[in-house]
Image (cartoon, grey):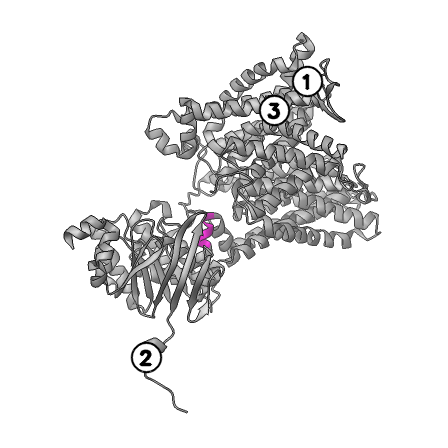
Amino acid sequence: MEIFTADPPRDERVSLLAVRDLSKRFGGVSALAGVTFAVDEGDVLGIIGPNGAGKTTLLNCISGLYRPDAGDIRWEAASISGMAPYRIARLGIGRTFQIVRPFPSMTVRENTAMGALFGQPDRRLQPGVALHEADDVLELVGLGEKRHYPVLRLTVPDRKRLEVARALAMRPRLLLLDEVMAGLNGVEVEQALQMVRQVRERGITIVLIEHVMKVIVGICNRALVLNFGRTLVEGPPADVLKDRRVIEAYLGQRYARDHG
Amino acid sequence: MSQFTQQVVLGLLLGGVYVAVALGFSLVWGILNIVNLAHGALVIVGAYITWDLFTRVHVDPFLSLPVDALALFVIGYALQRGVINRVIRAPLLFTFLLTFGINLVIVSLLLLIFTGDFRSVTPAYSGSGLHLGSVIIPYIRLGGLAVALVLAGVLWAILNRTRTGAAILAVGADRDAAQLVGVDLRHIYALTFAIGAAFAGVAGGIISTFQSIAPTAGDPYTLQAFAVVILGGLGRVSATIAGGLAFGLIEVLGQSAPWLGSGYANAIAFVVLVIVLVVRPRGLLGRLA
Amino acid sequence: MNPVGRRRPDWWRRVALIVAALALAFVVLAPLTSIDAAQQAGLPLLTDKLWFRIATTVAMFVALASGWNIIGGLTGYASFGNVAFFGLGAYTVGVLVTNRGWPFALALLVAPVIAALFALIIGLPLLRLRGHYFAVATLGVGVAVGEVVNNTSQLGASTGLFLPIVRSDLAFFYLMLGAAVVAVLTTWLILRTRFGYGLLAIRENEEAAAVIGVNTTFYKVAAFCIAAALTGLAGGIFAQWSSFINQENVFAISDNVQMILMAVVGGAGTVFGPVAGAIALELIIQTLAGGGSGAVYSQIGLGVLLAACVIFIPRGVIDFFGGRSRLSWRYLRQTLRETSA
């Protein structure tokens, strides 16, 4: 029996994550109105868009905190739309929150270990083992020395690192990062970029929501622009950022006209 | 058929009482995020004041309502400013426990002062009522409903037509932003609670006219106030009115159902509560989120 | 898992630990002096009827407070209706023993099961609620179940149920003590396992717990059922011990508040907090109640104590034993400042 070793052509390959026509309404407001895109293994997809465009809502739908009103989300061709968050997590999807959500009464190490303890589908770890795994992850994100700190002692950038560490401890295949760079100064952004690069080097597919364009250009191989809950443009970051429609969405028609 | 109409009328009249009881409770919950387990006790304090004035000085219960309001206003202000303000930024469980403790203290003090005997207020017009066809509308109940609607109007006017009311709404919407524009947080907290207590006192005065009161008679009203707010929705005076009237109807019609009886008042409140929370959490007229 | 902080083993903490161990030994062994054999051997009688009554009540509240702690302290869902499980356990034993002629031991095995089943049924809808809503919804359960029982003639309605009287202070004390030990042991075990960490995660941040893979619904309901079983067990023992049950003595909301108060004052979320709280508070209550004009003053005292504890030592007394804090003016002022307007 022969075993195929070549990769099948791109359009026949099943995407890691495929979102199709996703819609979500809150009362009368349409947060998402038909979003469609796909993420392949190894991608670093950047999602940008003005405030209120629906980016976080999108992440919440993918990770299961919201149930979509219409459309479908598929993980390796199987639908995960409306699945309970813990099951989506166990499939290998990890996420961070825009406003960090640590467990305040636990140390940095314990917080991270929680990801290992609950997020790994094939291995039901014991607390002791999970704590050891946490140590490795903490080294990666640069919190190794602070692992016994109570969360409340951490600075904001460190809390964001912790958020990422906890998700990484789950050994996810896909990591959803929600504005990890928000509130960081130039130096901190560089450090965070470096951390994201290292995550990618571990083979983890990344989807990140960002406002900091330097990041999008610096690390993403694809970019997706959302506006008013719809996909505006998709493609390589450099092209997307020069697209007239994108400039219009962020800065208004007049600016686009004057500078286009 | 006229039997049914009578029930509906009684239900609405009872609903009026519930509106009066729930207004203060809803205000304190909506603005201060405090579920006041001592609310029923404050209601009963108002009832006792009315009873005392009626028995000793022969003041008509409806005329003593302003006294109730004033007395409870002062008590409420002191309570919030002196005690409850100390835990207002603590997790919800603690305000819960605190108000329960206050409830214990108030009820016990009432037991000491008034003993556990049942008291009633029976003005001359107790038994009589308006006769509309075959339906009887007791004057006392009608007065109660009228007072409740007046209270609702007063609350609405305070909140929407005065500067103080604007400050209260601001604190309820965003505490920090309100502080930044110069609102004295501690004072507004105390004022809000005081207004809520004053309304509770008036409700108590009304209740004393048709129900015998004892120190522990306030507890059921707390749970019922909660059910009314859940049923009607938080955030608007009209929601409390809707919830109160609906709840009164449910209770009267429910108790006349063959398999239930008057012993199930609390059970009915609870079932309504759970059904609403599970099916339509924001209630009949509440705002979303 | 221990709260974070430096451990400062002051000498007085060691002394306190030794004293506690000795007291525990006394409590467990002293009742044995009341056995006939011991009496005949000339041992002094160290316990009397009053001692047994208070000790059994204290043990009961240790069980109740620990049970509440599992759903309220560890998981963060403050239930105000746990007393319903107590009452259900009591009435299960009451009905099985009185109406069906079952032996007490067998009925006692069923009590926690019934309580846990009830917790499963109401837990599924109720645990979807949070904060205030959950608290008052469970309050409603406690009140409503009591009311239903009070109106059901097969359960004795307002007259209550009378069980055949069994006189054995010793047996009931050890039985209740056993329930308390089971409750505390269960809490200790939970906190050492993955399940315990999951509960803490739910308490600290439920959304975050969900997205890292904690099956929050299952965990919450499980915690609720475990708490119910422990509470129901205590209720079952109470039924036979007291020989009489009705709405007032087994569905009392004030008992529910007492268990919460004990757990919180002792230290919610810890293993020994509820133990310390239950012992301290119940002894205080018994002292106040015995003081003559009794019930009313003890209620006032309880109310004031509750207020003071909530305001000044929200993390509970156990905070001082973990080495993290010291009971001082500074501590009191600090907690005050953290939570004041």
Q: Amino acid at mark 1?
A: Phe
Q: Is residue B221 above or below residue A223?
A: above
| Left-right relation of A247 to A8 | left
User: How far apart, in angstroms, are the residues tagged by discs 2 and 1?
Assistant: 88 Å
The residue that label 1 is drawn on is B114
Q: Amino acid at mark 3?
A: Val
Element class at badge 2: loop
Q: Chain of mark 2?
A: A
| Left-right relation of C107 to B249 | right
User: How far apart, in angstroms, are the residues tagged by discs 3 and 2?
Assistant: 76 Å
Circles 2 and 1, Cβ within 8 Å, touching? The answer is no
Circles 3 and 2, Cβ within 8 Å, touching? The answer is no
Q: Amino acid at mark 2?
A: Pro
The residue that label 2 is drawn on is A9
Q: Main secondary structure of the magenta part?
A: helix
Q: Position of residue A155 (x, y in %)?
A: 30, 46
Residues at discs 1 and 3 both on one chain: yes
Residue at screen point 54% across, 27% down: B24
Q: Observer-nearest residue: A95 or C332?
A: A95
Q: Is residue B95 above or below residue A91?
A: above
Q: Nearer the viewer's eye, disc 1 or disc 3?
A: 3
How many callouts does the rendering have? 3
User: In the rendered structure, which segment of residues is drawn in magenta?
Assistant: C204-209
